[in-house]
Image (cartoon, helix red, strand yellow):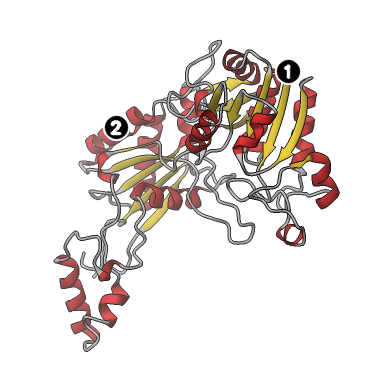
Amino acid sequence: MRYTGTVARGIRMPIIREGDDLATLVVDNLLAAAEAEKLIFSDRDIVCITEAVVARAEGNYATVDQIAAAIRQRYPGGHIGLVFPILSRNRFAMILKGVARGADKITLLLSYPSDEVGNALITPEKFDASAFNPYTDLLDEQAYRDAFGDNAHPFTGVDYVSFYRSLITAEHCDVEIILGNDSRRILAYAKDVLACDIHTREKTVRTLKEAGGRSVFSLADILSQPVGGSGYNETFGLLGSNTADAERIKLFPRGAATFVTTVAERLKAKTGRQIEVMVYGDGAFKDPAGKIWELADPVVSPAYTPGLEGMPHEVKLKFVADTLFAHLSGDRLTEAVTDYIRTKDSSVDRQDTLGTTPRKLTDLLGSLADLISGSGDKGTPVVLIQGYFDSLAN
C-alpha cells in the first residue's frame, strides 16, 4: 500500500540569465535531483516552471524609454486618463514611470476603498466611518485627504497616492488624481484613456468606448509589438510585467508554448515517461490577513501541455462515506469507496462532487507551484509535482 498522495518539490536551479538554454537546464537539474533524492518519474508527473525565468532566458525586457515611445504612438495628444491601476511598486510603478515619460499630463483614476486585487487605499475602519458611496461618489485628491488623511499600505508602508504622484511629477508630467469606481467618470477629464486594470480590462475598455472615449486601450495593447527594439508580448502587452531594475521591466514570456513542448519532449526522451509541463505565474489565492489577491498576472498559466487541460473530476470522499456507505466501516468501507471511485462517471452535477473545487487544473497547479517556489530567495523556480492525478483507488 502507498501511504502518500500528492508530493510537490522545489527544484533548485542556477541563476538564469538572458540567452541561457533554459529547457536543457530544467531537464538536467530535474534528472540530477531525481538521482540525488532517489526519485522515480511516472506518467502524468507535472513539471512547473515559473514565468519569470522563461522571460529572463528569452530576454523579454523593455526599458522605461521604450514604454514611453509606445505610449506616444498610442496617445499623440499628450493628455491621458489612467483608469484603475493596482497599487504596486513591483507591478505598476515602472509602467507608470514610462507612461508619464511619454505624456504631458495624466489624470489618474484610482478605485476605492481598495484596488482590483485588494490593496487597501483606505482602511476598512476609516471607510466604514465615512459617508461616501463608492458606487457614485467621485473624490478629488483634496477631498480624499480631508476625509481620510494619510494611508500607508499595511504591508509596504507606502502611501500610494503620494507615491504615484511623485513618480509622475519626477518625469516632468502634470498630474491630477481622482478616486472613483465608475470608469466613465474619467471622460470628463480626458477622452484618451488607458485601462490599467487586469482581470476586468475588457469590460472597462468596452464601457469607455461605448461612453464616447476616443483612444481607449488596455495595458495588453501597450508593447503588444516591439517598439524601438523592446521586448513585447502579442497577447498580454505590459500585463504580467514586473520590475527588473531602475529603468527596465521584465515582460510576460513570449515563447512559453514552444518551451513547454520542448521540455516535455526532452523529458520523454530521457525518462520514457509522459510528463506534463506548464509555465506558471502568480497563484490564484487570497491572503486572509491582508485581504489581497495574489493574482496580479493576467493568467496563472500562459502555456501548458495538453494533458493539463480541463478541471479535476473527483468525488467528495466524506460525502460518499457519510451517505452511500454510512453503514460500513473499516476495510469494508475503504473497499466500497475505492470501487465507487473506479467506476465514477463524468457528470458534473452529481451530488457526490459537491465541494470538489471546480477550477481549472492549471489554476490549481499554478497556485500550488507558486506557494512551493515562493517569491524570494529559495532558488527553486522549477517545481516537480507527483501523484496529483492519483486517487484513493490507485
Residue 20 appears in the rendering: yes
- Residue 327's place in the image compared with 265, above or below, is below
- Packing grade of label 1 (10 A; few <14, some 14-19, many >=20) is some
Discs 2/1, front: 1
Residue behind mark 2: 261
Residue 160 lies in quadrant: top right
- The residue sitting at the bottom extreme is 327
Q: Quadrant of residue 8?
A: bottom left
Give me the residue at 28% from left, 36% from top: 264
Relative to 150, is 242 on the left or the right? left
Q: Residues within 10 Å of mark 2 (few under 14, many from 20)?
A: some
Residue drawn at (69%, 53%) of the image: 133
Can you tell which mark lies on residue 387?
Answer: none
For the residue marked with disc 1, what is the amino acid? Asp
Give the SS element for disc 1: loop
User: Of 288 and 51, which appears nearest the observer?
Assistant: 288
Task: Give how far apart the Cα atoms at labels 2 and 1 are.
Answer: 45 Å
Q: Nearer the viewer, residue 235 or 215?
A: 215
Closer to the chain start, of discs 2 and 1, is 1
Circle 1 residue: 104
Towards the viewer: 104 or 92: 104
Q: Which element type, helix, strand or loop, lies under badge 2? A: helix
Percent coordinates x, y for residue 51 in the rendering = 46, 36
x then y, percent, for residue 229: 53, 11
Instruction: Report the residue that reaches farthest toward the top.
Output: 228
Report the amino acid beneath label 2: Thr
- What residue is at 67 percent from the left and 43 percent from the top? 180
State the residue at coordinates (83%, 46%). Answer: 145
* Residue 389 coordinates in the image, percent (x, y): 27, 56
